[in-house]
Structures are given as structure tokens and as C-alpha cells.
Amino acid sequence: MVPPESRRDFLKVGSAAAAGLIAAAPAVAAQEAEQKPATQPPSARGTEARDALIPRNAGGTDVPSRAENPPAQRSVLPQEFQVYDRYYPTYGGPEDSDQFLGKLVPGLRASGLPPVPFVQPDVPRLQWKWVDGVKEFHLHVGPTRREILPGQFFDMYGANGSMPGPFVEATQGDTVRMVVHNHLAEATTVHWHGAELPNNMDGVPGVTQDFIEPGTSYVYQFRVHQAGTFFYHVHVPFQEANGLVGFFIIHPQIAWDPVVDRDFGLLVSNVSIPANSTITTPFSSEHPGLTATLGHNWQMINGRSGPYTTPFVCKLGERVRIRLFNFSPVTIHSIHMHGTNFWLTGREGARTPKTAWISRNTEAIHVAQATDLEFIANDAGDWVLHCHMASHMLNHPVQQMGPRVRSGESVSAYKANVDVRPTVTYPHTDPGFQQPGYPMMRYLATQMTPKELEKLNARREVRGMRWNWHHAVRGMFTVVRILPDDLYQLAMNSDAPVKPGEIFDEMVRRRQRQEELRNEMRRRGLNVSQWNEWFQANEDLRRKGLA
């Protein structure tokens, strides 16, 4: 248990650092004193805000404006933009450098070690045991009841009690034995998508094997020589559309360079669940007035719908990999991450050569495809990651009609007794109806009970987020939390109480201090080597987002 006074220290450290850090750069200050007059003319005083935006070269003189630069000099990247900082958003150019947007900047862990474990929030790892030198897994496929939102359970297909199924981890060179137990009422098979294996292990009914009949088991065994992002799924179309799928991660024996500190999995999917039903259907719901796209009315990440999706949490400065995998029946998803650009470093089945990596912040993932993306988590905050298709940022959208579209009207009476309709006064008195398309915000008006909200906010991963963080996190939506080291410890490893918004507000304050410090460094006209010296001298403070 962390004592309250220790927990509060982080609220004080930032101001002390902000006050003392500039003074704690004697080498820079001394150099500047040698290069600049002891006093500035009156016209130069009181213009800190302007001067902070004027880059200066190593000699302390103003860099000529664009208009004054000869054409041959305009191609030279200013010193400030040649610097890369893993604890603060920076450019790191020129574009062909290893540091450009963090492209080849390694994680904080050492190179040459085995990979970090794969983590898929809200989905368990499939356990294994050694049997005669073989990694043996047992996969139980069958009906699964999944809580997509707090208190809202639906009947789907899955494995080992999870939808999607538990993720499988193996290492390049392993021989794996997959024992599949069929608890479905129908026959099935399992396919190991993308794995290069003996033909009779491929899992295609009729073509490579007989069906696995209900109540029976089947053994798949093969050696894995590849490394990358793969997955497994039953090879009966409508069974797989109802959730019988899972990650199959094959790690290299030694982690790829640049090494990552976190390796997350994000499986996106959608299903159709008709109104007043708990059973998924592979067909789009035929709601009058809704398009086929809206028919797949539940959008999920790792088998949950926002805001019940558990955030990905990492430390400021770490290199992070997220493996995106789309297993929707028919839908492409355009996945966008706020706050950072990422590098596309792999596709389903293989690592991409570094010369072919592409920087993006939005990536379209087609059905049954996977994409690996990597980035340096250099901007502390709570950043959302979501599908950018409008209908995928919602939960079970319905037509905007009835009492729910009238401001101030409660639907609780109708929900308590669906045979009695609440009275409605006509005409509309809400002036918003004068605007075409109104109301739009009602799509976000999912009502939750105090008990359901408590279930959302009781998770360690959301500690210290703003009290209403969940209001716009709907459908295929989650949050990537990048926390300074001490705030990460407070959220993830401490039992000390944390108020709603406490960590978020502290990160905002620290970012403001970072801006002030860097404006001062820009004013002093540091060159690349001086920036890097300053980084090294203040490593501990920078890891906490205080410099």
C-alpha cells in the first residue's frame, strides 16, 4: 500500500522540475552567455512568446526567414526537426534517417533477448504443456455466452469459454499439437490460417480431412518454421462468422530489431443480433430503413463493445506493437489511432522488410487480414483507437423515433412494461428539430445503471481517466493509455485510491511544462548534439513527462 503522502508527491515534482530544470542546464546556459551579449535591447525584452518560436542556430543568431533563404539553403532541415525525443512528439528527420518519426528507434529493453509476451486485452492465453518434446494445446470449441457490454450477454460461438477464442503463442521451431474437442451440435474443423504445414493438417473438411463430429476430438500436429501474426478459425463459414476464431502468434526465437516493449493484439469484428434477441446471426439484420452496413449492429474489439473494451496501457517512451486483425464477416474496417503516427511493419504471415515500412495513422484492414503496426509512445495521454466508419462508432443503432429522441423524456417506464406506451405530447417543442438530421447525439445516449458504470470503472486500466471518459467510446472503440513511469505505477501497480481525472489532469499539467521547457531550449538555439546532451542529462525527469 502506497502512503497518501507518497502518492501525492507526483503532484509536486512537476512544478519543482519546471522551476529548476532550465537553471539545471549550466552547460547550455554558459555557452549561451559566451555567444550572446550580457543584456538585450529594450525592444527584445517582453517578447518571450515570439522569441520561443524563432529558431536560432548554434551561434545564437536568428535563422533567416523563408523569404530570406536562398533556394539552395531552404532544403536544409532546421536543427530542431532533426532531433528525435522518445518522451515528447518530435519529427526526427530527415525522412531517410533511422529516427524519422521513431521508425527504427528501439524499445527500452535490451536487444538480443526473446520477444515480450503477447497480450490481448479481454481475451485469455491458451495454456499448453510439454508432452514428449511437443507443445500440446487443447482447444474446446462450442457455444459461448459473451458479455459484450456490462450486463448484456449474448449467445455466440467460441473456444474454452471465450469469444473470440484464446490466443495461441508458439516460438519459431516449435512442434505444436493442437487437440480440438468439438462441443458444438454440428460437425466442424479448424484451419491454421497462413501457417505452412503438412497438407493433411490444413483443416479443410473433405479436402484434407473428415469432419470432427460432435462430441469427438481431432489432433493437429505440425512444426512451425515461420514467425509472425497468424490466426486459427473453424472452416465452416457461419460458425466462424459467429466468433470461432483466435490469434495464433508465432514468435521469432530472438526478438526482431528494433525491439518492442509491448506486444498487443486487437481483433475487430462485428455481428448481427436482432432486437429482443441474444443470438447472433451471420446475416445482416433487416431493420426497416437501415442499410446492410448498419445491419451488423454490434461492433467489437476483442469480443467487447466500447466502452467495455479494456484500454491498452503502456509507459511513456516505450516502443509498442499492435497486431490488428479483422475477422468481420464482410466488412472492411478503417482503424485510426489518435495522437501518433505508426509504422506498418508486417502483414498476416510475415515481417515486412524495413525498406518497405510505411508511416500511417489510419489503416484499412480487409476481411481475414492482419497488420502489425509499431510506434514510440512519446506523447503521454489517453488516446482513442477506433474504426472510422461512422456506423462502427456506435452500439446497436436504432431508428431515431419514439420518446427517446425527445429531450427530457425517460424511457424507463417503457422498459419496465413494454405493453404500456408512455404518452407523448405533440408537436415537437425542441428547436433542434428545425435542423435536418437532428438528433444525432441520441446515437450515443446508451443508458447505464450505477452498477454497470461501476463495472466499467472498477478496472485498473481506467484508473485516473476523466469521469465521463466512456461517453463517446462506443462500438469499435478503445483507448491507448500512454502513462509517465510514476503514473503508470500509480495506475497499474498501486492500491492507493485515485480520483477520476486525477492522472489525466496531471498529464495535461506536465505536458504544459514540457512545452515551456522546450520553448526555452528553442529560444537558446540548441544544435542537435546539444539537444541530445540535454536529453541525456534529464532522462529520469523525461521518463516521467516532466522534461
Image: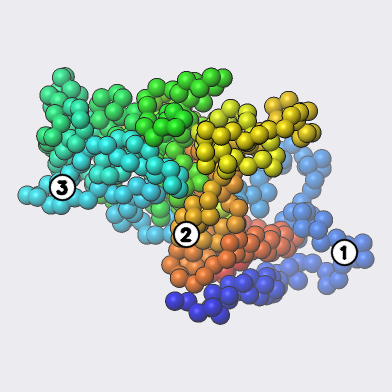
**Does the image show residue 96?**
no
Q: Residue furthest front?
A: 420
Q: Quadrant of the N terminus?
A: bottom left
Mark 3: few/some/many CA within 10 Å (<14, 14-19, 20+): some
Question: Can you tell which of label 3 and label 2 is closer to the viewer?
Answer: 2
Amino acid type, residue under disc 1 in the picture: Gly
Which amino acid is tagged 2?
Answer: Ala
Q: Earlier in the sequence, mark 2 or mark 1?
A: 1
Give the spatial CA distance, label 3 vs label 2: 36 Å
Numbered label attached to residue 135: 3
- The local crowd at label 1, few if under 14, some if 14 to 19, many if 20 or more residues have their Cα within 10 Å, is few
Task: Decide which of 281, 173 is in the foreground and name it.
Answer: 281
Give the labeled residue for mark 2.
458
Q: Earlier in the sequence, mark 3 or mark 2?
A: 3
Q: Are marks 3 and 2 in contact (CB under 8 Å)?
A: no
Q: Nearer the viewer, residue 422 or 301?
A: 422
Left or right? Give the position of 168 relative to 480.
left
Mark 2: few, some, or many residues within 10 Å (few <14, many ≥20)? few
Is 86 above or below relative to 544? above
Report the front residue among 161 and 504. Answer: 161
